[in-house]
Amino acid sequence: MTENDFLPGDYQNSPEKGKATWKAPSNIALVKYWGKRPVQMPANPSISLTLDVCATRTSVSFEKRDNKEGFSFDLFFEGNPKADFKPKIYTFLERIEMYLPFLKEYHFTIETSNSFPHSSGIASSASGMAALSLCLMDIERQLDPAMDQASFFTKASYLARLGSGSACRSIKGNLVQWGKHGNIPESSDAYGIEYPFEVNPVFRSYCDTILLVHKGQKQVSSTVGHQLMHAHPYAKNRFQQAFDHLDKLKPVLASGDLGEFIKLVESEALTLHAMMMTSMPYFILMKPDTLEIINKIWAYRKETKTPVCFTLDAGANVHLLYPSSVKKKVLNFIEDELAEHCENGQYIHDQVGEGAIKINT
């Protein structure tokens, strides 16, 4: 599909007011997206597990207005006005107006909340922009009831990407691929798709415990980090590596080969941070406790043969990945050895989910 496919025709309805509520999950990339082209296009393809517990719930109430100049909206986070979020939302609305031409006809009240602590290093921009995009798409479906489900979710992913790249992977499916890849049918830089190949049942119930090493603001934002890939000396090889890893992941996901899965996922995590440490300017987002956790995971896996591994986002926190069959054993390991390296001993248990859901209010 091209961007022209997301331009709407004439709307059939014109409601005076209404409301839409959606809950969208965060996600954790296995093959990382790092580096982008305008506007919000990935420099390399990626694939992620959709989470379940870590999610954003957003309600958008809308009411017709007379003045159609600019965008009109109020924004509340956790029940309180959030003025510092508004510029990002305004930019998002500017980007998507051509695809949702009704936006200036209404005043919107956006109420959003997370199931996880804000600034905890979990991808709240992904779940937040996905939830908002789904609400706006829900409103468009009220204007155009003939819209089919497939078009609804694909366009929601397309719009979410314009707010936050990885948000396009938080719409639908437990394993989502984003970015054009010649060996993955229907893959696109413009939106995410449900992974089209065989996936072993072991990955359908995979667990992710997020070890909250550092909950404060990062010293370098992901936006800046992506931009630094433009002149990065290793960017070309890194982008090719991501393509190659997606090819290698196909038989691994089909067979349930956890040994190869662990090698690839941990390599991707360390490569992501290697790109940060070798950019100009260079920076390090890992903390000493991040490295302590990684070393303990390696030692534990070697000693017990338990198929547990880590991945990292662009931050200090560690995502501990493991099959549900060893959950009890791993939870004891976390409590006994890893929790001491988490800020205030905090961590969040999560698992693979099925994607966003509509909340009937």
Image: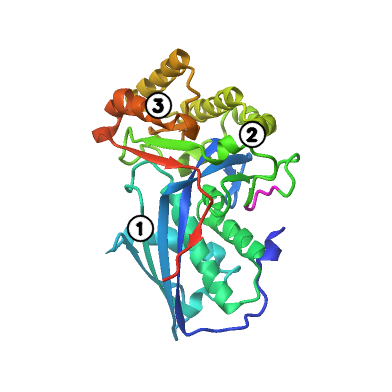
Where residue 9 appears, as percent x and y from the top left, is 67, 76
Nearer the observer, 130 or 304: 304
**Quadrant location of residue 98?**
bottom right
* Residue depicted at x 46% and y 18%: 301
Q: Counting other residues with Cα less than 10 Å from the Cα at mark 3, is it few (<14), some (14-19), or many (20 or more)?
A: few
| Residue at 60% over, 31% down | 235
Identify the mark at residue 253; answer none if there is no mark.
2
Q: Position of residue 241 (x, y in %)?
A: 64, 29
Give, as a single range, the part of the protein colored magenta.
187-191
Give residue 222's position: percent from left, percent from top.
Answer: 46, 41
In whole angstroms, how far apart are the C-alphas of marks 3 and 2?
A: 23 Å
Residue 350: quarter of image = top left
What SS does tag 1 mark? strand
Q: Taking 216 as reference, is 29 left or right?
A: right
> What is the distance, in whole Å, between disc 1 and disc 3 at their CAs?
32 Å
| Residues marked 3 and 2 touching at CB (< 8 Å) | no
Nearer the observer, disc 2 or disc 1?
A: 2
Which amino acid type is marked by label 2?
A: Leu
Q: Tell me what residue is drawn at x 43 percent, y 58 percent.
A: 88
Q: Which residue is mark 3?
A: 329
**Amino acid under disc 1:** Ser
Q: What secondary structure prevails in the magenta region?
A: loop
**Quarter of the image holding residue 143?**
bottom right
- 159 is higher (above) or lower (below) than 238: below
